[in-house]
Amino acid sequence: MKKTILCFTLLAGLHMGASAEPMHPAMAATAAVPAVASQPAPSDGEAIDFTLTDLAGKTFTLSSLKGKYVVVDFWGSWCINCIKGFPKMKEYYQKHRGRLEIVSVDCNDSEARWKAAVQKHGMPWVNVYNPRGDGDLAKKLGITAFPTKLLVDPEGKVVKTFVGEDDSFYTVLDATVK
């Protein structure tokens, strides 16, 4: 057990990169989570809505996208699998443009790191900041591994939850958003 914890701690240190800002302690274990297949989560089928701040400092509410399919992507700049998934997400964002929106919810970054990561990775969709503490949306929804993607239908209900970076997400996305 001590070796496992040490491994996660060492990997967490590697994810910090050149930044002087340390990784959030809760993320040390999840930073090394391997990609896994889609899994149902307790929120599947339940209506979700939230309000967070976007890159421009304006209030964004998920229900403003009612009538479209939405992918809510919980990620962090420290998460290798999250970053690896962005090129394919960009491809599918273009493929389903007009019928699908993506909302990336940053988790466990400072606001400065979040903004820098969005710019660095060229994320063309809605990006919102998820503050730590009582307002932490990921915590409220019980999201503990990253990336986690929620596929939301036009009525605002969660169709399916995907944990990890897995091609089955894109198969379901294609079948759902026609």
Image: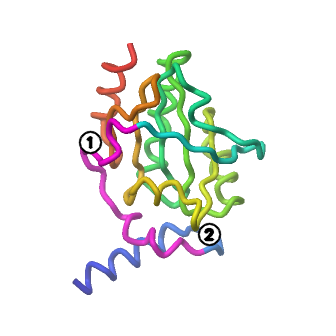
Q: Is residue 25 magenta?
A: yes
Secondary element at image label 1 = loop
Q: Which residue is mark 2?
A: 18
The circle drawn on residue 38 is 1
What is the three-letter code of the residue carrying label 2? Answer: Ala
Residue at x 48% of width, y 43% of height: 73
Residue at x 72% of width, y 42% of height: 59
**In front: 20, or 37?**
37
- Position of 114 with respect to 161 (left or right) is right
Give, as a single range, the part of the protein colored magenta: 22-46
The circle drawn on residue 107 is none
**In front: 74, or 137?**
137
**In front: 87, or 23?**
23
Q: Earlier in the sequence, mark 1 or mark 2?
A: 2
Query: Which image quadrant: the N terminus?
Result: bottom left
Q: Position of residue 53 (x, y in %)?
A: 69, 47
Tags 1 and 2 touching, CB below 8 Å: no
**Of labels 1 and 2, the one closer to you:** 1
Q: Position of residue 76 (x, y in %)?
A: 52, 56
What is the three-letter code of the residue carrying label 1? Answer: Ser
Query: Which image quadrant: the C terminus?
Result: top left
Q: Position of residue 39 (x, y in %)?
A: 25, 45
Q: Is residue 102 magenta?
A: no
Residue at x 46% of width, y 34% of height: 71
